[in-house]
Image (cartoon, rainbow, N blue to C red):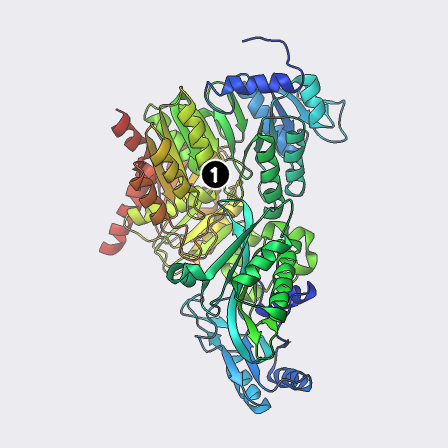
Amino acid sequence: MKVHEYQAKEILSDHGVAMQPGIVAESVDDAVQAAEELANDGATMFVVKAQIHAGGRGKGGGVKLARSLDEVKEHAEAILGMDLVTHQTGPEGQKVRKLLIADAVDIEQEFYVGVTLDRAKSQNVIMVSSEGGVEIETVAEESPEKIVKAWIDPTIGLRPFQARRLAFGLGLEGTALKQAVKFITALYEAFEATDSTIAEINPLVLTGSGDVAAVDAKINLDDNALYRHPNLAEMRDIHEEDPTEVEASEHGLSYIKLDGNVGCMVNGAGLAMATMDIIKLAGGEPANFLDVGGTANAETVEAGFRIILKDPNVEAILVNIFGGIVRCDRVAKGVIQAAQNIDLDVPLIVRLQGTNAEEGKALLDESGLELRSAVLLKEAADKVTQALKEADVA
Amino acid sequence: MPRAAPRGISAVTDHRRRTDRMSILVDSDTRLVVQGFTGQEGTFHAEQMIDYGTNVVAGVTPGKGGQTHLDRPVFNTVAEAVEQEGANTSVIFVPPPFAADAIQESVEAGIEVIICITEGIPVKDMKSTYHYVQRHGAHLIGPNCPGVITPGQAKIGIMPAMIFEPGSVGVISRSGTLTYEAVDQLTRAGYGQSTAVGIGGDPVIGTRFVDALKLFEDDPDTEAVVLIGEIGGSAEEEAAEYIQAHMSKPVFSFIAGRTAPPGRRMGHAGAIVSGGSGTAEAKFAALEKAGAVVVKNPALIGETVSEHLG
C-alpha cells in the first residue's frame, strides 16, 4: 500500500527520524495558516507540495517555493485541485486534494537513503548515496561508486558499525555524522516496525546550520501485514486508486487497466500475464490484467465482464480458464449466465481447459450464445486473431 | 517398498539420502503430515492427495490432538507426528498470520521437506523464516505455491492430478495455473514429468530456481527441465548463470509478463517491474545467452520441447 508524503513523514517522525518541519493542508486557508505556524517556529521560506502518490511531482509543477505568506496562498490556489501530470500518473493526471506546507530549509548538501528487500539475498538492504535529489537507479547506472550498501541479518538487525559505515559513506563528520547514524538507525527501525517494503528518503539534506533532516519521504507498506497495523491501514487514500480497480477488488477480482483492445479474464496471475502476452502475439494489445482467482463462478464472471466492458477500447474478450479445483463445466455455466445478463456487443472467445473441459466446451457450444470456444491455448489465440480481422473489415 | 514406520530424526535423514537419487523432493517414500489438517482447505486437499496415493500419515491442528480425521491421527504438534508416525515431509494450509510459525515448527521437528501453500504471509515473517530454514538445512518450497508433484508417486499440494504423467521432464514455475498449462502441453506432446515444483510467486521463497535446477541436474530420472518464470526480481537471471555454469541437461523457458506495464504489481506479490529491472525481455535475453531454449509463445511450450527432444 502506498501512502502520501505527509503520512510517511508522520510515521517516520513517530519513530524518531529527523524531518523537515511541515503541516498538511486541505484548503488554501489551511495552507496559509500552516505557513504562519511554521513562521512562528522560525521558518522564513516555505515549500508548497502537492500530495499525490505518484513521483515526479516537482517536474509536473506540483512543488513550489514560496518566499512569503502571499506566495504560499498563490501557489496553494494554483496547485490545490489541479490535475497533476507526472511520468507516473498517465496523461490524465491525478487530482491534488491535499498540500504539505514545509519549512524550506537551507540546503548545504543532498543525499539519498533507502531501505528495501534484496530479493536475491532474502535480506533487507540499506543504500546510501552521496548524490541526492536524483533517482537512485540513475546514480546506480552513472556513478555506482557513490552508493554504499549494507545488508541486514534479519535475526540480528542493523548493527551500529553498519550504520556508521553508511554515514561515513556520505562523507560526513562531527555532529552531522552522529545525526546521520541516528537517522539511519531510526529509519531502519521504522521500516521494520511498520512492515514497510520500501522506505526512501530522497533527498536527505545537510542544512546550513549543520543538521541532518529528511526533505522528502516515501514509504510503501506490505499489504499482507496491514492486519497488524490497523492505524496504518486507515491511511489508505481511495482517491489515489483507479475506481474500476477498486470496484474489481470488491468482487474479489484483481484487475489492472491497460491501453489495448482485447480484454481478458483468467484464473491465476501467471496465466493471466501469459494470456496478455498471447493476445499481443495474436495481433492485439491487452486491454487489462484480470485474475478471477480460485473461484470463477457466475457472479464473479459477470462482474468481470462488466468491468472489462467499461473500457470503450475493448474490441474482443478472451476468457482463459485452466480448471484445477475449479471445474470447467461450472465455469461454462457461469459464462453462459453472465453473457445472457449482459449485452455483449464484442466477440467473446472462451477457452476452457483442465477438469471437465470437454463438458464445459459442449455446454458453451450448445448454449446458442454467439461465442467462440476453444480447448487449446493456441486455438484461442487463433480465434482472437480472427475476431480482430473481422472487426477491421467491419 | 514396505518398511517399518521410521521413528525419529535418523529415519528422516535416511529418507533424504534416498530421495536425492530419484525424482526430487517427494516420492513414494514421502510420509506426509498436513498442518492445518482439519480446516476446510486442509481437509479438501488432504482428501485429494490421499486419493492420488500420497502417503498422508498424520495431520496437525493445535487443540485437536487425539482425534481422527480422514482415517488419520491428528496431533497437537508436528513433533508428535514425526515421533509417532515417522513424518518426513509437511504441507501447510495454515492462515497467513500463523503460517511462518508453522514452517518453523516443522523445521524444529526435523521435517526435511516443507511445502507451504499459504498465500499472503507478510514479507517480514518470511525473511527471518527463510534464514532459519537455511541454517537447519531443510528444504522449504513456497509459500504461495501450488506444491510439488512426482507423478505416479506423490502429489503434495493443490494441483489437478489428471494433467500429470510420469516421465523425465522436470518442471519449475513461479505460478500456479500457468504451471498446469505448461504441464498439460507437455503431457499432450507425450512428455511426462519427473517432478513438477511450484516455487511460488512471493518476493521471499524457500526454494529458488537455482535450487530446483540443481536438484534436477543431480536427478538421473530427469532428462530436461522446463522453467516458467515471470516479471520481477532477478531469480531468472540467477538461473541463467547457473544454467551456463552447471546444467548439462536442456532447459526450456517461458517468462510471463512481456506486456505488463512497469511499476504495477501483477497479482503475485513478487511480479513487478521496478526501476527498469525485472523485465521479461531481460530475463529472456539472459536465459537465451546461457544456452536455454526460450519459448516466447506460451501456447508453444509442448511443441518446442517436442521439436528439440524429438
Where is mark 1, residue-wise?
A331
> Residue at 61% of width from left, 47% of height from top?
B124
Find residue B3 and report its image quarter.
Answer: top right
User: Label 1 neighbourhood size at 10 Å, few (<14), some (14-19), many (20+)?
Assistant: many
Find residue A236 and report its image quarter.
Answer: bottom right
- Give the amino acid at mark 1: Val
- Tell me if A36 is positioned left or right of A135 in this view: right
Residue B173 % position (x, y): 44, 36
Q: Nearer the viewer, residue A357 or A181?
A: A181
**Disc 1, SS:** helix
Residue A204 % position (x, y): 55, 69
Q: Nearer the viewer, residue B277 or B90?
A: B277
B92 over B9 or under it: above or below:
below
Give the letter of the chain under mark 1. A
A123 over B63 or under it: above or below:
below
The answer to whether residue A370 of the structure is visible from this angle is no
Quadrant location of the C terminus of chain B? top left
> Residue at 31% of width from left, 49% of height from top?
A280
For the image, the number of numbered tags is: 1
Quadrant location of the N terminus of chain B? top right
Residue B27 % position (x, y): 51, 19
Residue B19 % position (x, y): 50, 19
Q: Residue furthest front?
A: A174
The answer to whether residue B130 of the structure is visible from this angle is yes
B192 over B206 or under it: above or below:
above
